[in-house]
Image (cartoon, helix red, strand yellow):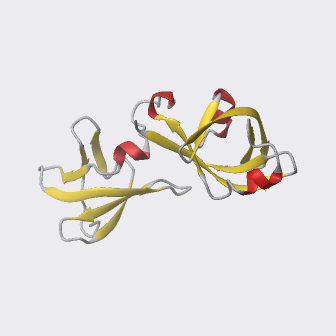
Amino acid sequence: MLKFKLGKIVSAVGLKGELKVYPYTDYKERFEELSELYIGTEIYQIEKVRYSGQLAVLKFKGIDDRTAAEKKRGEFLFIDREKARKLPEDTYYIADLVGLTVIDETGRLIGKLTDVIQNPAQDLYEITTEEGKKALVPAVDEFVEAVDIEGGTVTLHLIDGLI
């Protein structure tokens, strides 16, 4: 079963087992909508959610003291794919984009989309070409003609020097 990474545990908070989490979502309130999460491969029930700046602070059933919480530092939080939020049209999960075949408008193979780098201005698609070269393409309408998750392709409008 496919799982989505929702955040990373960065530290323990206090003495009662709370965990400070760096969210991998632009909607950190998502944690309030969930009743359980995976920490690594184990599933835990969420007891309480609060926030500290841009971080979420979570309390899980069964993690009841600082020592237990410290053992979880560095672990990732996951949800099952089926529990993922519905996205607006023309918005995609990174997990769905990575691995897509990249072609140009004529259908010529360029390579594979190997990563999505999130920046404040816009995301960047990391493309690994057939020759093994890496290129970064801004994920904007000027360059991204189409994304076909079902068909497994991203079609780019290339300009000189882009790749």
Direction right: furthest residue? 15
Q: Position of residue 112 (x, y in %)?
A: 25, 57
- Quarter the C terminus occupies: bottom left
Task: List x then y, in percent, for residue 34.
Answer: 63, 29
- Looking at the image, which residue is at 60% across and 37% down? 37
Q: Is residue 76 left or right of residue 52?
A: left
Residue situated in front as seen by the camera: 49 or 27: 49
- Residue 136: image location, x then y, percent: 36, 64
Quadrant in the picture for residue 26: top right
Q: What residue do we see at 56% from left, 55% from top?
A: 120
Asked whether 156 or 41 is in front, the reply is 41
Using the image, determine if residue 7 lies above or below residue 158. Answer: above
- Name the one closer to the observer, 162 or 72: 72
Please say if 129 is above or below 41.
Answer: below
The foreground one among 27 and 6 is 6
Report the residue at 12% width, 49% height from top. 107
Q: Is residue 137 left or right of residue 120?
A: left
* Relative to 49, 115 lies left or right: left
Q: Quadrant of the N terminus?
A: top left
Q: Is residue 2 left or right of residue 55?
A: left
The picture places residue 147, in percent across and down from the top left corner, at 29, 41
Number of labelled discs? 0
In the rendered view, tell whether residue 132 sits above or below residue 125: below
**Residue at x-position 30% and y-position 51%:** 99
Classify residue 133 by image quadrant.
bottom left
